[in-house]
Image: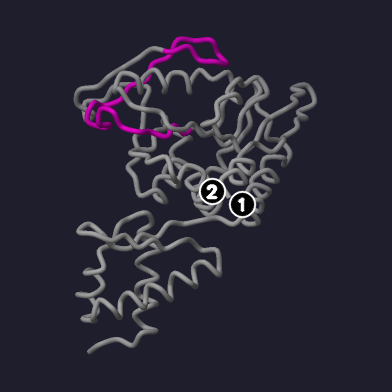
Amino acid sequence: MKLKRSERIVIMTEYLLKNPNKIIPLTYFVKKFNQAKSSISEDIFIIKQSFIEESIGEIVTLSGVNGGVVYRPVLSLESAKDVINEFLELLRSKDRLLAGGYIFMSDIIGNTNLMNRLGVLISYIYKDKQIDAVVTVASKGIPVAYAIASVLNKPIVIIREDNKVTEGTTVAINFVSGSRKKIETMVLSKKSLNTNSRVLLVDDFLRGGGVMNGMQTLMNEFDAQIVGKVVLAECFDTRYDYDENYTYLAKLTKINEFTGEFEISEGNAINKILKGI
């Protein structure tokens, strides 16, 4: 039994929302609903207009042999400001300052709703970078990396600090931790990342830049092209602001470890979104 147009649109909308940045051939919907291609095209046009009006995202139609339809999530400036402000408000709550000038963020990183929205925001900033993989280090960078990768519909690559039998042949590098000034190790399986991949580096907190520098060095071993670097929050002593491909959502500007007081300012994410509008 053929479905009504309204029923088809509901099912198609759900499928598109669950498969962002994926080319879906029109023939998939034609066969699924047993409808003419022209009818499916009209359905997609209705969805496209609704998505634009509600700032849900854009529907792009690709022509040719490999053509189809692609749903690309977008974030309105107002929504972007809302999610950044929510993130900053949580960071500014009391008792977050840890020894060494770090901020306790585990509860925030564990907030899946917030991480998913931040994933949409960050993926929107890098939507035109043709990213092949999202790369992070175990373990606190994983939730936000997954959130970004799920929107971009790209694989996530996790760098570890020790070698495991299950990883097969690996590449390892030593780096100097920016804050602790200790020599540490990063390990990545050769099968995890293709040579010459375009990668987005992601971490939760940046102080001194040692981990980020280590990730960049390791990516050089794979001849990977780094098209962007992202951290949720950085410390005042970070020196990455000069890099136009670097994004941070918040900055720890002042620390008083005796009183536990600190100040958090907004990062450069909103400015990057404004430039992209």
Q: Which of 222 and 211 is in front in this view?
A: 222
Residue 21, relative to residue 170: is it above or below?
Answer: below
The residue shown at (51%, 31%) is 245
Colour theme? one colour
Asked where in the image residue 187 lies, by quadrant, the reply is top left
Q: Do the residues labelled 1 and 2 touch (CB within 8 Å)?
A: yes
Query: Total marks drawn?
Result: 2
The residue shown at (33%, 26%) is 224
Q: Is mark 1 on a helix, strand or loop?
A: helix
Q: Is residue 210 magenta?
A: no
Left or right: residue 78 versus residue 262 is: left
Identity of the amino acid at label 1?
A: Ala
Residue 139 on image: x %, y %: 44, 33
Q: What residue is pinned by disc 1?
A: 80
Residue 67 on image: x %, y %: 26, 60
Q: What residue is pinned by disc 2?
A: 121
Residue 89 on image: x %, y %: 70, 46
Residue 257, relative to residue 264: is it above or below?
Answer: above
Q: Residues within 10 Å of mark 1 (few under 14, many from 20)?
A: some
Residue 155 on image: x %, y %: 32, 42
Q: Is mark 2 on a helix, strand or loop?
A: helix
Q: Nearer the viewer, residue 145 or 167?
A: 145
Q: In which quarter of the image is the N terminus?
A: bottom left
Asked where in the image residue 27 lies, by quadrant, the reply is bottom left
Identity of the amino acid at label 2?
A: Leu
For the record, the magenta segment spans 175-202
Left or right: residue 200 versus residue 166 is: right
Residue 120, relative to residue 181: is it above or below?
Answer: below
